[in-house]
Image: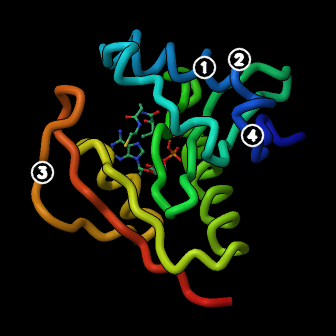
Amino acid sequence: MSNPFSVSLVSWHDGEPLLKSIREQVFIREQGIPAELEWDEQDQHCRHALVLSAQGAAIGCGRLFENGHIGRIAVLPKWRKQKVGTAIVEALLDYARSHDYPQVDVDAQAYAVPFYHGFEFIEEGTVFQDAGLPHIKMHLKLLPR
Ligand SMILES: CC(C)(COP(=O)(O)OP(=O)(O)OC[C@H]1O[C@@H](n2cnc3c(N)ncnc32)[C@H](O)[C@@H]1OP(=O)(O)O)[C@@H](O)C(=O)NCCC(=O)NCCS
């Protein structure tokens, strides 16, 4: 059986409409995050992971800053628990490792902590509110190649 999805790294310039459609569905409509908090100037400076289904539909995304910060990991509801999120984070970690980033970090939504534990991220500090949702900072040290 062929792989049901594929992940690639894209610039904001190349991926904007598809990346926006996923984040609008997940963060703005599903999680109720205000549009003015969702969109920022950082997107154009990030590397973006974009997941397409075998039919070419955009189903998942995430972004990585030059300073190693990971964010905006999102998978459409009907594609969850099928390792799409794992593929997104692994693609961003591969990029970070291949560019000698010493570590990456994420402001994880509290419910998603077990997801990041799967990659051996470690919590630091205490829970804080961002966009009205509980978050905790987590980091992962990357081994030099
Ligand atoms: C968090 C999210 C990206 C996970 O994507 P996903 O494709 O479902 O994740 P995966 O299938 O790769 O899950 C890998 C593992 O993470 C853990 N995990 C995933 N979702 C979880 C959840 N909601 N609660 C607890 N553990 C979870 C599980 O251990 C899972 O392994 P399993 O499938 O063997 O149980 C997805 O639920 C999502 O888009 N949520 C809405 C947006 C969001 O909150 N993003 C995170 C911002 S920090």
Of marks 3 and 2, the one in the foreground = 2
**Residue 114 against residue 50 in the figure, above or below:** below
Tell me the residue that label 2 is attached to: 17
Quadrant of residue 94 within the rendered picture = bottom right
Exactly how many numbered labels are in the figure? 4
The type of colouring in the image is rainbow
Q: Percent from the top left, x then y, of residue 49?
A: 67, 43
Tell me the residue that label 1 is attached to: 20
Q: Find out whether the residues at labels 4 and 2 contact each other: C-beta distance under 8 Å.
A: no
Query: Of marks 3 and 1, which one's residue comes earlier in the chain?
Result: 1
Tell me the residue that label 4 is attached to: 11
* Residue behind label 2 places its C-beta within 8 angstroms of ligand 1: no
Query: Left of 128 or right of it: where is 112?
Result: right
Q: Secondary structure at mark 2?
A: helix
Mark-to-mark CA distance, 3 and 1: 28 Å
Query: Left of 11 or right of it: where is 104?
Result: left
Q: Percent from the top left, x then y, of residue 29?
A: 40, 9
Q: Residues within 10 Å of mark 4 (few under 14, many from 20)?
A: some
Q: Quadrant of the C terminus?
A: bottom right
